[in-house]
Image (cartoon, rainbow, N blue to C red):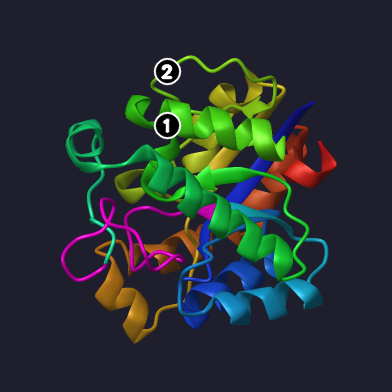
Amino acid sequence: MTKLIVNADDFGLSEAVNYGIISAYKNGIVRSTTIMAGMPAFEHAVELLKENKGLGCGVHMTLSLNKPVLNYHKTIVDENGNFYRRITNELVEEKFDLDEVYEEFCSQINKVINSGVKIDHLDSHHHVHTLSSLKPVIEKIVEKYQLPIRGGFEYDINYDKVIPMTESFYNENVTEDYFEKFIDEFKKQDVIDVMCHPAFIDEYLVNSTSYAMQRMKEYSILTSKKVKEFLRENNIELTNYNRL
């Protein structure tokens, strides 16, 4: 039986995002989420987790939205103290001090832990942890925290807690028959992380990302009774990282 981790990214981004994720957990197939320590609705997200203890939660390490948790960085922020919006290997190699990246990621993870959240895995916003230029940072992170981490790496990593993932549930692939189309891909794995972004909509979300309105469509599919029945009929077990 394939174990499917439907992981909702961006928990903490805004209150509407938080409410959408919680509803997709209560009424749909989401069983896991990843929280962003430096976002405006972080504390709101933490409170919701206390009320929904069955929802697994990891840390969505962030390097490309809003401001860092630490306020003294020199190389990983622009002239306004904000993260660069698009992180590439070229940008990292040209500008970034990797010690700053490591310190920032550790601070984000520690902030979540210190808030009382029992974290069960790691991933990152815009998949920055998979960039080959950040390999030295991620190797130190997994050695320090010993948590499962979402896969999709550009590089080889000697770590036995990498979980296969798919980012196919996104944009034009967000359709009513998505799970039917990709069921064979899921069944090739013992466990697979399906990245998703369910949300309700508010002003902050619309102003912070171009991928906003599509999140309501994701929400509708992830809470569809037809989808839940299809997965059950195909012996797909919904789970989270904490239960692996």
Q: Which residues, given as a range, are shown in magenta?
A: 60-81
From the top left corner, tell me how far across and down residue 190 is, in percent: 72, 22
Mark 2 Cα within 10 Å, few/some/many (few <14, many 20+)?
Answer: few
In the rendered structure, find residue 130 and report the number of the disc placed on it. Answer: 1
Describe the element under mark 2 as helix, strand or loop: loop
- Quadrant, the C terminus: top right
Q: Is residue 150 above or below residue 44?
A: above
Determine the image quadrant of residue 115. bottom right
Magenta segment: does it hold 69? yes
Q: Tell me if label 2 and label 1 are in contact, CB under 8 Å.
A: yes
| Point 54% across, 23% down: residue | 185
On the picture, is 210 further left or further right than 16? left
From the top left corner, tell me how far across and down residue 64 is, in percent: 32, 55
On the picture, is 114 further left or further right than 158? right
- Depth check: 6 or 86 in front? 86
Q: Is residue 65 above or below residue 115?
A: above
| Point 60% across, 50% down: residue | 7
Tell me how far mark 2 sits from mark 1, CA to CA.
7 Å
- Depth check: 56 or 178 in front? 56
Q: In this rendering, does residue 30 appear at all?
A: no
| Magenta span: chief secondary structure | loop
Can you identify the residue that label 2 sits on? 155
Residue type, mark 1 in image: Thr
Describe the element under mark 1 as helix, strand or loop: helix
